[in-house]
Amino acid sequence: MRLSFSGCVLDTDAYRLTRDGTDVPVEPQVFDVIRLLAHNAGRVVSKDQLIEDIWQGRIVSEATISARISAARSAVGDTGEAQAIIHTVIRRGFEMVVPVEEIGGDPKPKPAAAPKPDRQKIRYTVSPDGTQLAYATSGDGPPLMLAGHHITHLEVNWQSQIWRSIFDRLGSDHTLTRFDIRGSGLSQANPDNQELEAYVADMLAVADAAGMDQFPLIANLQAGPVAVRFIAENPGRVTKLILHCAYARGRAAREGAPSDQASDPSIALLQEGWGNPDNGYMRAWLSMFLPLVTPEEASDLITQFGAACHPEEIAEKRKAIDRFDATEYLARVDVPTLIIHPRSAAAHPLSEAQFMAARIPDAELMPVEGANVIMLPSDPTWSEQMDAIM
């Protein structure tokens, strides 16, 4: 049998590999790895399946598997960085992601990808204190709520590839509900009440308006204390909690916090250049929370932040959420909880995730490599984190 893919021809009878018409010498085990992946093109081959087929079930080290995969990539003209032909699926296995055609036969069909939601529906509701809140739904399936950071904009974020890759993934098998918190995006600006209980009431108002009786909840950053208190005060509504770089105590509520919030450098930097990607102060502020973003991502995010909140409001909003403290509610979180947190986040250190994990009954802590407080597609662990969330 001869299999053709990405300029390569694999002759499984003659044990011969050519690339662009030139013979490529490969070791027998490496050839067998390529053969196995090609025969299963479009499907993930688990490590167990790889070991069973290549090594007949014998115990082999991770280093041995990695070496064979690396050699297979090199033989077919791929690299571990590009992964354009052989893709690593974190914690699952490996997949040949290019079409494979049997020469003289029909192309091997690649499984159809889950349809991506092509639009979102934006609606409004009103919180008990009269604050207008905008929320959006997309995708199809059981309900899922994503409670994001404090400077979102439903429309602008939907048009950004940074966020759409996340929204589309979550909405591929769920009806995803997102909302702009009070004072941000399409929700009402300049709300009178900035206390934690108001944000909890907002979350309940959105859940009720969207018809979400029971749902899993993903909470990022300041949505963490909101989610914790929401669950404690509304038993039975949330079925699973995922805290992503979240915290129970805002930065002003932690030990060693400055007595005067005005002296906090992250707040002081907000006074200059808000929303301007060419402003050095703005980029310095962003680097405190997202030090590993690409220059293109930084420009995109700063522009989105500028659209989400007016510069005269952002500093007061930041001071308000920095005072959030849901410590007393942690022990009352009675749903399965996964805490995902980057090891090197400076503004919200891993110790805050450990603080929550020690107080939420049976919570699982999943540290990941990185320093960004928002999960971005450019993060090396993006797939690992999305797999854990899903």
Image (cartoon, helix red, strand yellow):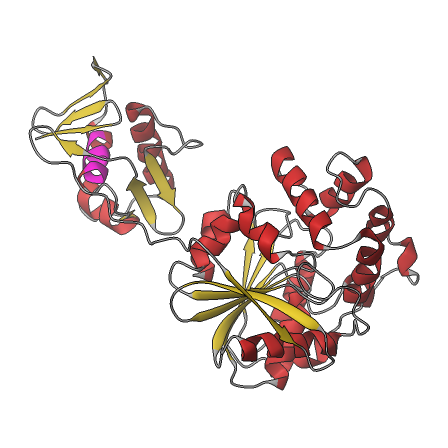
Residue 206 x %, y %: 59, 74
Task: Name the residue nearer the viewer: 326 or 320.
Answer: 320
Task: Name the residue nearer the viewer: 113 or 364.
Answer: 113
User: Eyeballing the image, is 308 above or below 328?
Assistant: above
Residue 329 x %, y %: 67, 80
Query: Is residue 230 rendered to the left or right of residue 262?
Result: left
Q: Can residue 121 be seen in this view?
A: yes
Residue name at image x 70 percent, y 44 percent: 302
State which quadrant residue 129 falls in. bottom right
Magenta segment, prevailing SS (helix, strand or loop): helix
Query: Is residue 12 rendered to the left or right of residue 278?
Result: left
Task: Name the residue nearer the viewer: 40 or 33.
Answer: 40
Where, quadrant-wise, is the C terminus in this rendering?
bottom left
- Looking at the rendering, the stretch of residues picked out in magenta corresponds to 31-38
Q: Can residue 330 be seen in this view?
A: no
Residue name at image x 78 percent, y 74 percent: 195
State which quadrant residue 62 falls in. top left
Task: Name the residue nearer the viewer: 284 or 359.
Answer: 284
Residue name at image x 46 percent, y 51 percent: 384
State which quadrant residue 356 falls in. bottom right
